[in-house]
Image (cartoon, rainbow, N blue to C red):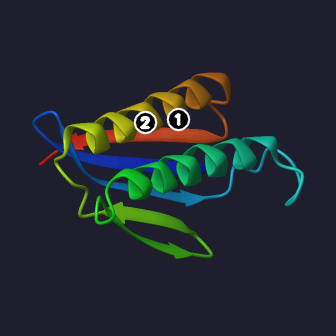
Amino acid sequence: MIKIKYLKSGYEYDKVSILGHALYDDYGKDIVCAAVSSIVICSVNGILSIKEHGLKYMKSDKGIIIDNISKDKNVQKLIDNMISLLKQLERDYPDNVKLEGGKL
């Protein structure tokens, strides 16, 4: 299962972690993992294209952790959009994607 956790202070995102594998299909054929990866990579690249230091991230073989997220309005909107898309995947694939949010 892909576990997505995010932390917010008020209405602003501070940290997002996306870890695990969806286990929907074999590695390399998993449409759920591909969807999550596409959403996250597109969002991170979009943010970095409009604000060079809009966030920091660390990738590993287990997933990605995004932190030091800028409070810039556009950056926050893109993170919010990313979370919304991931929530839709969670609704469509509840056995493969789990999303949890929390406040600081």
Q: Which residue is mark 2?
A: 83
81 lies left or right of 24: left
For numbered disc 1, what is the local secondary structure?
Answer: helix
Image location (x, y in percent) of residue 22:
69, 49
Q: Quadrant of residue 84?
A: top left
What residue sits 89% from the left and 51% below the top? 29
Q: Are marks 1 and 2 in contact (CB under 8 Å)?
A: yes
Disc 2 crowd rating (10 Å Cα; few below 14, some 14-19, many 20+) is many
With respect to residue 87, does 72 lie above or below?
Answer: below
Foreground pick, 23 / 31: 31
Say which quarter of the image contains residue 81.
top left
Question: Which residue is found at the position 51% from the left and 50% from the top?
Answer: 3
Apparent side of residue 85 relative to residue 53 in the rendered image (left or right): right
Q: Amino acid at mark 1?
A: Leu
Disc 2 on helix, strand or loop?
helix
x, y percent for residue 61: 62, 76
Q: Is residue 99 left or right of residue 52?
A: right
- Furthest toward the front, the residue is 50
Identify residue for label 1: 86
Query: Would you call the spot at circle 1 few (<14 residues within 10 Å), some (14-19), or many (20 or more)?
Result: many
Which dot marks residue 48? none
Q: Nearer the viewer, residue 52 or 16?
A: 52
Q: Residue at x 74, y 48 (%)?
A: 34
Q: Could you say where residue 52 lies in the image, as x and y percent from the top left? A: 33, 64
78 sits to left or right of 59: left
